[in-house]
């Protein structure tokens, strides 16, 4: 798979402050790419560079094989974290204006807006002013405006904030559909569960540096601790734990079994495998529960950032 | 270019469709006219109140002849009542005031010793009238004493009116000079109002985009510079439309008013208290045709062209500064500290225009300020009716254009950074830092 967006050695400074320190990120075509990082890490600076709102001090950005140029704004859709529309402008008028700024003709924009307004069942809002709409309603309008010109690259910064769970679900589906139609999506969020659900690849930025990137599955593998959650029904829990400690590392676990029994986290040590652990357990009693602890995106985020500081 | 057009269109529509714009365009002329009518009405009302002034002449050299009644002042001789009793009467409110002329031998000393008592401080017109009456009589007495024949003096009175020419063959007179001052001041004043009203409107529009947070969406589609220029041009177009509407209304209105007031006009003029002024006005009404001919001789085409040029130049220069201020702050209350340095040159220009240009339109101060770009639009507009050499105008225009380009360039740098900055109110040091940021 080729890359839609390549960010190569980008440096951005504001006075003495370095917002991005030699950051390189490659985003494959047709993927949902999670751009993660703590507050103030430099995500917004990077997004603004991709949107050509600001220019990097050095480094380059390549969009679909071409060096980023002013005409590329028509191929990018951006939903900023801080949403905003003209409050006293009518919904339809405003959507038309923003679509035309992205290079759509008026007739084409009208046609597409009709499609999206019907799809979201909001056609009656056309002549309403934004200030008459609720926050969630305005967000919907803003989402439509972001995707209307069918850009190759979509950048969503916290796309679900302000939406109720039902609408958040709707937006998530739309985003995945857009990807299936060929769009590439940069997804910046602090909600790690949505990263798990949606992202194919991620990059983690902390303190102006990229500290981690790659396929989410690969990163998880990289962060695996070979620890298993174990639930066992046994007559002699103390003895089992004692024996286990001879060949494995054992930690207390915090989960409930259906039947009461011994629960613990067991970490494999050098020279033994999951099978070794399982056969030991089966010899000691009834195995109720045996699951590898896969690090969540949340765990990875916290671990990586803590390690970096 | 296409996007710039879109932005200009939106800004223009947002401004023009706004209720306050419609109100201002159609109501403010009505309010202006209403206020003028009110002022004239009140002045008339005020003048109609007759002031009874009594005089106590202990010197015995004045008579009722010397105190001629006017439409608003009536004199009465109370010499027989005596000063103390008269003062009491004035204090009780029976008369407006009492003039006391003591008995003194020397006319010179007497001239300095006349006193006037009243409950309220008299207006300038009233006191001038009294002084003139006293003065004229005392001077006549003095002249007689010196053996000068008063009749011969009266017969020798000649009124001169110097016709002024410049070397391009234009004829001018005091009257037409007054016209020039009027036209120039009006143009300069309107320019200042336009700059303030539409400049702050640009600023408010920038702040609105910032607080509503739409700015980030817009600048991901267009260059901040395009947005800023679109705003400035869009607002200017709305302003020009407003002036156009006012112009049309003014034409309709002045035709209507002159038809309505045609008969009344002479009366309004003749009520003027200043005799010299009144005489001039009568002359004006008598020689209406002459005046119109002279007005027609003003360089109207040049005036119109320069008016539009300085209008746009001045407005663009200032509104780019206003846009930069709007971008630098989060809300309107924070704009105060940055507004002062912008308002100061505007005010200065109007003062220079009002005090210097009128006295000496081609003096060094007037010339200097009509070249300094922040004041030149107003000061030069005020000078133009008096005839400014073309090369001076060209230099002034060039300086204005170059400055405008430089200021827009600087303002765009502040704007570009400012629109994405929230929180702390920036200092001048911050602005300077923003100017030096790259890209």
Image (spheres, grey):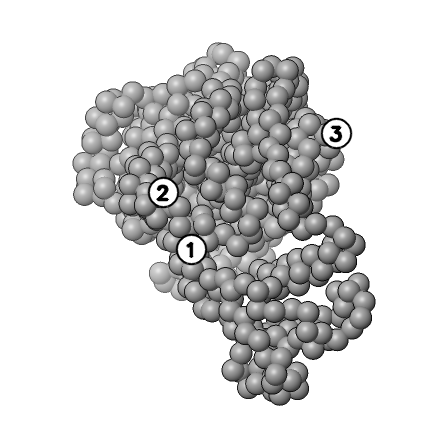
Q: Residue at x 42, y 55 (%)?
A: B40
Image depth: mark 3 or mark 1 in front? 1
Seen from the viewer's position, the closer of residues B192 and A142 is B192
Label 1 residue SS: helix
- Residue topped by disc 3: B364
Task: For label 2, count other residues whose C-alpha is less than 10 Å away and answer few (under 14), some (14-19) or many (20+).
Answer: many
Chain letter of the residue beneath label 1 in the structure image: B
Viewer can see residue B346: no
Q: Residue at x 41, y 42 (%)?
A: A84
- Residue topped by disc 2: B25
Mark closer to the chain start, 3 or 1: 1
- Residue topped by disc 1: B40
Image quarter (top left, top right, bottom left or bottom right) of the N terminus of chain B:
top left
Marks 3 and 1 in Cβ contact (< 8 Å): no
Q: Residue at x 54, y 31 (%)?
A: B176
Seen from the viewer's position, the closer of residues A236 and B172 is B172
Mark closer to the chain start, 2 or 3: 2
The Cα–Cα distance between marks 2 and 3, rounded to whole angstroms, is: 39 Å
The Cα–Cα distance between marks 3 and 1, rounded to whole angstroms, is: 38 Å
Q: How far across and down, in percent of the image, does residue B346 sit?
A: 62, 40
**Callout 2 and callout 3 share a chain:** yes
């Amino acid at each position: 798979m080729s890359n839609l967006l390549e960010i190569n050695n980008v440096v951005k400074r504001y006075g003495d402050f370095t917002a991005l320190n030699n950051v390189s990120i490659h985003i494959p075509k047709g993927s949902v790419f999670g751009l993660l990082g703590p507050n103030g890490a430099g995500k917004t600076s990077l997004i603004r560079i991709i949107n050509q709102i600001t220019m990097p001090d050095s480094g380059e950005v390549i969009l679909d094989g071409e060096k980023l140029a002013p005409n590329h704004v028509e191929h990018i859709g951006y939903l900023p974290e801080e949403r905003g529309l003209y409050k006293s402008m009518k919904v339809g008028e405003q959507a038309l204006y923003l679509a035309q700024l992205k290079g759509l003709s008026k007739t084409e924009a009208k046609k597409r807006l009709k499609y999206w307004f019907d799809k979201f069942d909001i056609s009656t809002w056309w002549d309403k002013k934004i200030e008459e709409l609720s926050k969630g309603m305005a967000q919907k309008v803003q989402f439509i405006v972001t995707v209307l010109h069918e850009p190759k690259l979509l950048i969503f910064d916290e796309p679900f904030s302000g939406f109720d769970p039902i609408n958040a679900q709707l937006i998530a589906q739309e985003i995945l559909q857009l990807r299936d139609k060929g769009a590439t999506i940069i997804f910046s969020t602090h909600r790690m569960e949505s990263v798990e659900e949606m992202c194919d690849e991620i990059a983690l930025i902390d303190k102006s540096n990229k500290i981690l990137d790659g396929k989410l599955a690969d990163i998880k593998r990289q962060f695996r601790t070979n620890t298993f959650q174990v639930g066992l029904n046994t007559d002699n829990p103390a003895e089992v734990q004692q024996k286990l400690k001879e060949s494995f590392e054992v930690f207390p676990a915090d989960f409930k079994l259906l039947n009461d029994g011994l629960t613990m986290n067991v970490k494999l040590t050098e020279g033994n495998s999951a099978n070794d652990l399982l056969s030991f357990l089966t010899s000691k009693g009834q195995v109720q529960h045996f699951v590898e602890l896969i690090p969540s995106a949340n765990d990875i985020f916290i671990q990586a950032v803590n390690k970096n500081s | 270019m296409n996007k710039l057009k879109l932005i200009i269109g939106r800004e223009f529509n947002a401004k023009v469709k706004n209720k306050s714009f419609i109100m201002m365009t159609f109501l403010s002329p009505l309010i202006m006219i209403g206020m003028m009518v009110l002022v004239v009405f009140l002045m008339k009302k005020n003048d109609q109140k007759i002031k009874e002034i009594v005089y106590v002449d202990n010197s015995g050299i004045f008579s009722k002849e010397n105190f001629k009644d006017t439409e608003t002042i009536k004199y009465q001789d109370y010499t027989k009542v005596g000063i103390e009793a008269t003062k009491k009467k004035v204090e009780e409110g029976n008369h407006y005031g009492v003039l006391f002329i003591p008995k003194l031998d020397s006319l010179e000393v007497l001239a300095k010793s006349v006193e006037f008592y009243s409950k309220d401080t008299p207006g300038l017109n009233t006191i001038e009238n009294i002084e003139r009456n006293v003065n004229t009589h005392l001077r006549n007495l003095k002249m007689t004493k010196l053996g000068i024949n008063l009749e011969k003096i009266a017969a020798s009175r000649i009124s001169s009116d110097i016709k002024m020419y410049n070397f391009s063959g234009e004829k001018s007179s005091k009257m037409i000079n007054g016209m020039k001052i009027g036209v120039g001041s009006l143009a300069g004043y309107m320019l200042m109002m336009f700059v303030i009203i539409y400049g702050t409107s640009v600023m408010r529009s920038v702040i609105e985009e910032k607080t509503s947070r739409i700015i980030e969406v817009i600048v991901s589609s267009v260059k901040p510079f395009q947005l800023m220029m679109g705003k400035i041009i869009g607002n200017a177009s709305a302003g020009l439309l407003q002036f156009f509407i006012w112009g049309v209304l003014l034409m309709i209105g002045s035709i209507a008013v002159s038809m309505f007031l045609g008969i009344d006009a002479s009366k309004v003029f003749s009520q003027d208290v200043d005799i010299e002024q009144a005489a001039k006005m009568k002359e004006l009404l008598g020689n209406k045709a002459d005046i119109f001919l002279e007005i027609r001789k003003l360089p109207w085409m040049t005036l119109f062209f320069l008016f539009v040029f300085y209008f746009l130049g001045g407005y663009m220069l200032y509104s780019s500064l206003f846009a930069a201020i709007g971008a630098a702050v989060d809300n309107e209350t924070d704009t105060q500290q940055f507004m002062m340095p912008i308002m100061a040159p505007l005010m200065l220009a109007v003062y220079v225009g009002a005090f210097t240009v009128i006295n000496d339109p081609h003096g060094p101060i007037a010339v200097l300020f009509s070249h300094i770009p922040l004041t030149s639009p107003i000061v030069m507009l005020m000078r133009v009716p008096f005839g400014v050499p073309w090369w001076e105008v060209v230099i002034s225009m060039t300086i204005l254009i170059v400055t405008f380009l430089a200021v827009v360039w600087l303002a765009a740098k502040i704007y570009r950074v400012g629109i994405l900055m929230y929180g702390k109110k920036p200092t001048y040091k911050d602005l300077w830092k923003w100017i030096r940021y790259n890209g």
